[in-house]
Image (cartoon, rainbow, N blue to C red):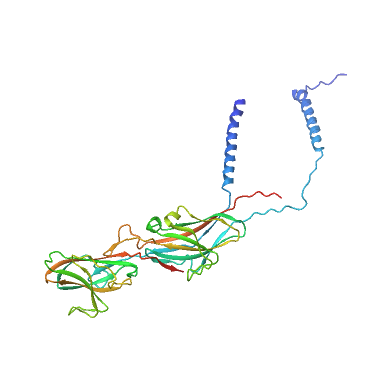
Amino acid sequence: MTMRRGLMTWPSALCASLLLLVATSGTSNAALAATSASATQTVGSASWSAILSNGTTGSGALPESYVLGGVKYFNLVNTGTSTLTPARYTLTYSITGPNLGIGWIDLQVCAGGTWNETVHTCSGTIDTLATTGATAITSPAPQPSAPGAVVRARAIMQGVNVTALIVLGVSVTPTNAGGVTTSS
Amino acid sequence: MSRSPRRPRSRFCTRLLPVAGAAAVGIAVTGGAVYAALTATAFNTSAQTVTSSTLSLTYANNGVGWPTTITNMAPTDVVNRYVNLTNGAGLNAINLTLGVADATTTALTSDATKGLAATVSSCPIAWVPATGTCVGGATVILASTPLATLKTTPGTLAATVAANAVLYLQVSLTLPASTEVTANGTPPGSTIQGLSAALTWTFTEQQRAGTTTNS
């Protein structure tokens, strides 16, 4: 009988200790805290992208291969959601063409005017964006600034007029020339 | 004369009844002694009033605030939003922090290098949201911190906040500079482009330390 009483005493003491511990830890967590949560703020990042295509829209992104005999016209399309300005983005054009012999190929746009694609003239100023074998030039050449905008470009064989296979490309990189702040 | 035969007494009556009776008498005497003791009490005739304080924190948009969607952020873009944060009239508070949660985690809030970052500045009076002007001089109270960090470790804005205090805050969100090249319309694999985050900003404060008052 005495032993049984003793055995019952230990669990009781243990329970009491546990309760004390719970009560103590509860005390330390009982300090008041206040929070204020905002409404959901939706933030989206832009995309910066341009392609050369032979259509009037963004389809048919290059690089693709073209059999070039003299002159061929393409579209330079802003397919991103960012406005491509020289201050914010650098556009880099590339053009390669194997088996050119002594000729070369230029990628050109008609700045301040339009192409006459029949007689191959420009009512403005011809700017060369890239040349085979040369380091690609960058903006501020005419570029499709607004999303969806299109600039008409052409690849033209210079020097010796032969048939060649060319590959065109364009890359867009944020210029990071200082932050643009929008306050509201 | 013959005597009627005597009934035999039960063992209970002969042995235990006297003992029980004596015990009952003893209890009665003892109990009587307790009830008979003198007792005196004293109490305040005017009730002591005790009230608990409150701790509350509320925010209000200043300008368009956080509910207005931010679109098309590009590297180095900074978008400022303005909120007024009020500590309630009850308690002074300590450890004011700002954390953020993103309902749809992308690189915007998981990439500590290319993802979004926040800076918090305080103004003595309300900001002018249209111009981002702080008359009286702004103080940066949270240096630029990636949201990837704020999601797990809220940033400390103030060690103490007085009751009734109003904090006029500018929360600047920026997409850090990066050199991500999109070639022929195809962004790199780990792109920061074309993503969306649904942010919930949470300010948190604790009550001031408990005090002992003598008077």
Q: Measured along the vertical axis of the image, is residue A18 above or below residue B47? A: above
User: Observer-nearest residue: A57 or A94?
Assistant: A94
Where residue A118 sits: x, y (%)?
18, 79
Q: Position of residue B75 (x, y in %)?
A: 37, 63
Q: Quadrant of the N terminus of chain A?
A: top right
Camera-side residue of A116 and B52: A116
User: Residue B165 lies in what quarter of the image?
Assistant: bottom right
Count of numbered circles in the view: 0
Residue farthest front in this picture: B137
Question: Quadrant of the rendered structure where residue A146 is?
Answer: bottom left
Q: Residue drawn 76% across and 53% down?
A: B46
**Residue B1 % position (x, y):** 88, 19
Q: Is residue A43 visible?
A: yes
Q: Which residue occupies 79% across, 27% down?
A: B22
**Where residue B17 sits in the image (x, y, percent)?**
77, 26
Answer whether residue A1 is visible to the viewer in this image.
no
